[in-house]
């Protein structure tokens, strides 16, 4: 296939790839059958949507997309046991991971039990002192006075800690989505679509999605018994936040969960999310961007460098004053996290570049790197190299690391294999993210083996990232109405990339640097139509200098269309990502 607009090497070094002949034909057929705009049909064609399904796809509903909870193994056992605990007034402990998904999952259960006048004990391990997932001392302590322990977003691989709790007389339910091993821990129920003995389960769900399915099943049981449960739809704001922040693919039921969850969040009824949105200075209706880049990082900040349970408590609180105080503290911790991250990133990038960014695995390790930021730094390395990346911080002989992957490369399965082979102390995760613990002596052999496993999946053959475009767009066509219709084909994120369009042969009417490194542009097609554009971080690379110093040259420009909310006005805007001389 020839390069789109003949752009073989753009200003950022990428080859532009346009829609295939097949997708172009499908888009044209969709446009004729549905009367939808061509740009929207281009997006639908790439997603494989047929004309008969277009309306339903553009307005996804929970009813039509949510899997039957009873299709998951152990779901009915888990639902019956938690309902029994509520009916008997038993003390219940919720053991959660310290990230957004864990915190939101815990808040869902707390919210649900609050409806029945009960308050479970929340326990979130300290990232540095206890590490990820259940540990023996904590589980034994909880088992002393909690007949039931519910592990959320963790527990599938926690054989010894769960066995310790069971030995103390407690029963354990695991609600998780991380890749399971060949054997399961001795829990009463392990509800996990990524258990090895599951077939056809919705493995794309995050833990909060799995918890929501449990709540749906319990709601069904309550209705069958003539009893009323809480309003589950009002809890979808938490599910949406977790789904986006955990980078779960926005496919299947996840699309509807996020679409409906954003509507619930816009009502500003949950004090914790209201306070968080206010400290993040959100001035518009929530979108996936806000969840992934404004709210999610602040919830995570407590688990990364502060008090581990702060984010979960914020999401679960019903007190507006308490929420405001916790949100302010998380905002402060997030600023501190950024400073720590910047120092680790500089060292990790230098190491990775020295080893070579074209290897199947990009990795870095060093003494004293904060375990709370290694995952974020791994994500930055992944973006820089378009390769799976792992970053490890050592404290004495023990190293704790985190990895991030690229589409098509299953990092979690590879790390799980390392653990099974005894090359690391422990590790696990899912396709796009994984965590591991290892000794200094294990470092080099483990990274070599991991690189080999990833190479067999094709990671070593990945070339420079192409820029995939959905078609051409002229400034006059980029109206508010068109952009709103395109947004209905979302939400966009992991597994559902935002549509990108090329604006050909554009004249730059003005270019202005804003902030430290951003670029604001005014574009014209020479026929009177204009469009504003913003290129974030443009002066950190070649885009800013080239476009600001355009000298009258014309450019092909590529990026995403969005609505810019400013001073009460809503206007179309191009989020510029790449450019090439016309």
Image (spheres, grey):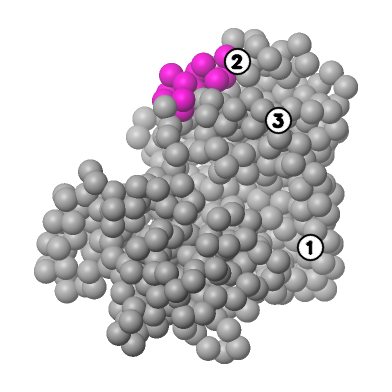
Tally of marks: 3
Residue position for label 1: 331
Q: Earlier in the sequence, mark 2 or mark 1?
A: 1
Q: Tell me how far mark 2 sits from mark 3, CA to CA.
A: 15 Å
Task: Identify the element where label 2 is drawn.
Answer: helix
Q: Is residue 216 visible?
A: yes
Q: Quadrant of residue 188?
A: top right
Residue position for label 2: 448
Residue position for label 3: 351
**In this orientation, which residue lies closer to the viewer: 147 or 262?**
262
Asked if 305 appears above or below 357 in the picture, the reply is below
Asked if 96 appears above or below 401 in the picture, the reply is below
Q: Could you tell me residue 316's position as x and y percent?
A: 71, 60
Q: Which residue, as the protein is rendered here, is positioned at the far front?
A: 551
Do callouts 2 and 1 mark residues in contact (Cβ within 8 Å)? no
Q: Quadrant of residue 141?
A: top right
For the point 35% across and 34% down, the residue is 200
Screen quadrant of the N terminus: top left
> In front: mark 2 or mark 3?
3
Q: Could you tell me residue 335's position as x and y percent?
A: 80, 58
**In this orientation, which residue lies closer to the viewer: 267 or 166?**
267
Magenta run includes residue 287: no
Q: Tell me how far mark 1 sits from mark 3, CA to CA.
A: 30 Å
Task: Identify the element where label 3 is drawn.
Answer: helix
Q: Which residues are magenta?
A: 448-460
Q: Which residue, as the protein is rendered here, is positioned at the far right?
A: 396
Q: Earlier in the sequence, mark 2 or mark 3?
A: 3
Q: Tell me how far mark 2 sits from mark 1, CA to CA.
A: 39 Å
For the point 78% across and 57% down, the residue is 334
Q: Main secondary structure of the magenta part?
A: helix
């Amino acid at each position: 296939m020839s390069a789109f607009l003949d752009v073989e090497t753009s200003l950022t070094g990428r080859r532009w790839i346009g829609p295939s002949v097949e997708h172009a034909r499908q888009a044209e057929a969709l446009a004729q059958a549905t009367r939808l705009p061509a740009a929207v049909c281009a997006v639908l064609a790439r997603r494989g949507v047929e004309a008969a399904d277009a309306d339903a796809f553009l307005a996804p509903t929970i009813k039509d997309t949510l899997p039957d909870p009873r299709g998951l193994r152990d779901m009915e056992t888990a639902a019956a046991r938690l309902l029994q605990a509520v009916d008997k007034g038993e003390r219940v402990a919720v053991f959660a991971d310290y990230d957004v998904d864990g915190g939101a999952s815990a808040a869902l259960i707390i919210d649900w039990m609050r409806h029945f006048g009960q308050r479970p004990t929340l326990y979130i391990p300290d990232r540095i002192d206890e590490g990820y997932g259940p540990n023996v001392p904590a589980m034994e302590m909880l088992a002393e006075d909690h007949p039931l322990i519910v592990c959320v977003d963790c527990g599938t691989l926690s054989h010894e800690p769960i066995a310790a709790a069971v030995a103390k007389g407690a029963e354990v339910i695991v609600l998780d989505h991380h890749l399971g091993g060949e054997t399961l821990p001795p829990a009463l129920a392990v509800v996990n679509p990524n258990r090895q003995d599951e077939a056809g389960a919705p493995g794309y769900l995050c833990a909060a999605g799995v918890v929501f399915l449990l709540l749906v099943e319990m709601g069904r049981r309550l209705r069958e018994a003539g009893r009323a449960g809480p309003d589950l739809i009002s809890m979808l704001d938490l599910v949406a936040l977790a789904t986006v922040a955990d980078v779960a693919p926005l496919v299947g039921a996840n699309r509807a969960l996020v679409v409906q969850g954003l509507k619930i969040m816009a009502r500003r009824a949950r004090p914790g999310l209201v306070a968080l949105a206010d400290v993040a200075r959100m001035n518009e209706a929530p979108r996936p961007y806000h969840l992934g880049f404004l709210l999610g990082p602040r919830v995570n900040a407590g688990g990364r460098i502060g008090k581990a349970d702060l984010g979960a408590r914020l999401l679960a609180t019903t007190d507006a004053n308490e929420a405001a105080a916790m949100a302010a503290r998380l905002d402060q911790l997030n600023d501190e996290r950024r400073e720590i991250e910047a120092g680790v990133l500089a060292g990790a990038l230098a190491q990775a570049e020295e080893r070579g960014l074209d290897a199947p695995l990009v990795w870095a390790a060093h003494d004293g790197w904060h375990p709370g930021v290694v995952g974020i730094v791994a994500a930055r390395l992944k973006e820089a190299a378009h390769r799976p990346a792992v970053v490890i911080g050592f404290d004495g002989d023990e190293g704790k690391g985190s990895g991030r992957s690229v589409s098509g490369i299953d990092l979690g399965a590879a790390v799980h294999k390392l653990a099974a082979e005894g090359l690391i102390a422990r590790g696990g995760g899912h396709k796009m993210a994984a965590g591991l613990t290892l000794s200094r002596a294990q470092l080099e052999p483990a990274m070599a083996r991991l690189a080999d496993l990833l190479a067999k999946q094709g990671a070593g053959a990945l070339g420079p990232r192409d820029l995939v475009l959905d078609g051409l767009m002229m400034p006059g066509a980029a109206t508010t109405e068109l952009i709103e219709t395109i947004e209905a084909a979302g939400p966009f994120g992991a597994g559902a990339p935002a549509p990108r369009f090329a604006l050909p042969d554009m004249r730059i009417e003005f270019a202005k640097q804003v902030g430290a490194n951003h670029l604001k542009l005014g574009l014209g097609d020479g026929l009177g139509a204009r469009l504003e554009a913003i290129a974030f971080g443009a002066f950190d690379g070649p885009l800013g200098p080239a476009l600001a110093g355009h000298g009258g040259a014309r450019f092909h420009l590529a990026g995403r269309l969005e609505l810019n909310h400013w001073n009460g006005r809503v206007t179309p805007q191009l989020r510029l990502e790449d450019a090439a001389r016309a």
